[in-house]
Image (tube, rainbow, N blue to C red):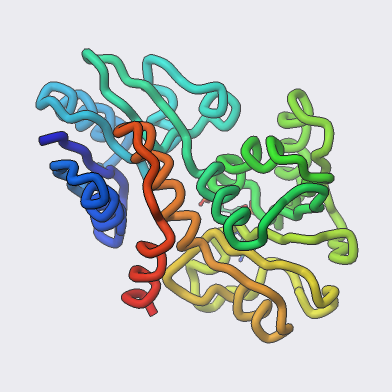
Amino acid sequence: MKKFAVIGNPINHSLSPQIHSEFARQYSIDLLYEKILADDDKAFASIIQNLMDKGYSGVNVTLPFKICAAKISTTKTSEVDLTRSANTLSFNNNAIEAHTTDGIGLVNDLLEKIGTLANSSILLLGAGGAANAVISSILSEKISNLYLWNRTIQKSFDMTQNWQKNYENISVMDHIDLDKIDIVINATSAGIMDTASSPISLNDSHKDLICYDMMYGKQTPFLKSARENNLTLFDGLGMLVKQAAASFEIWHEVKVESKSIEESLRSILI
Ligand code: ATR
């Protein structure tokens, strides 16, 4: 039996064990997948060593350990290098191979839901770990422009400067102009508190604006505003399932079907 886990803090809410077990069923793979709570980065690193000693094959990493996961790894994909974030670790003879599948999870979900990103102008809201982790995957699509906006706008300028070393079509949108935008993606944590309002107003947007929130499991103020303005909207459940699919494919080298799992999770969460 192959052994895996997801490590985070908090971790109780994680749907990863359910998702990975469903994928394993598709190929009759015998798999153990646990949830592990770590107190801090030091505890996280010692849990990783312990799991390697016990013969685990790999782990998924969730908040707040994605940066630490990237740091302690032996080898990294170029995307982990760029984003400084890892959510999928493979163990191989006491070496740790780091991958990040958040970006590909987002992009694959957008592609499934809206068909193509070619020539799109995208506005990404937020400048934390969630936003940083998806930028290179978005920019690897044939999009027209990626604009960054954050409540503390200086962080968007810093982020843009960093990413402009590798990509040309990224810039800051310090005054929101939704007429220029096809897709707006919320990567802020504004939805965590019920009292928060949408990070930007969607009231003046054109009717074809597509709104995507990387959060799932609750209606964020951003999605509520999108609904009130009759805009096309998606939450992050599809991204969650697709980042898990990409992790599963790295570990087991098989392609999985993910749409039915998203549908069954949605019926449980709502
Ligand atoms: P994560 O790793 O989940 O991205 P984070 O690093 O704490 O979390 O970043 C949270 C992001 O959400 C930041 O971009 C934050 O904006 P600031 O840099 O201005 O703090 C953003 N954010 C949090 N609450 C917000 C709110 N009510 N409105 C707008 N942006 C918010």
User: Residue 215: horizontal and vertical position, in percent?
Assistant: 50, 63
Can residue 167 be spotted in the picture?
yes
Number of marks in the rendered image: 0
Q: Is residue 170 above or below residue 207?
A: above
Question: What residue appears at the point 70 percent right and 53 percent down from the top-left corner?
Answer: 116
User: Residue 167: horizontal and vertical position, in percent?
Assistant: 77, 30
**Left of 78 or right of it: where is 90?**
left
User: Residue 213: horizontal and vertical position, in percent?
Assistant: 58, 64
> On the rendering, which quadrant does ligand 1 occupy?
bottom right
Can residue 63 be spotted in the picture?
no
**Left of 251 or right of it: where is 183?**
right
Q: Quadrant of the C terminus?
A: bottom left
Q: Is residue 244 above or below residue 88?
A: below
User: Residue 53: horizontal and vertical position, in percent?
Assistant: 12, 22
**Left of 118 or right of it: where is 31?**
left
Q: Quadrant of the N terminus?
A: top left
Nearer to me, 190 or 124: 124
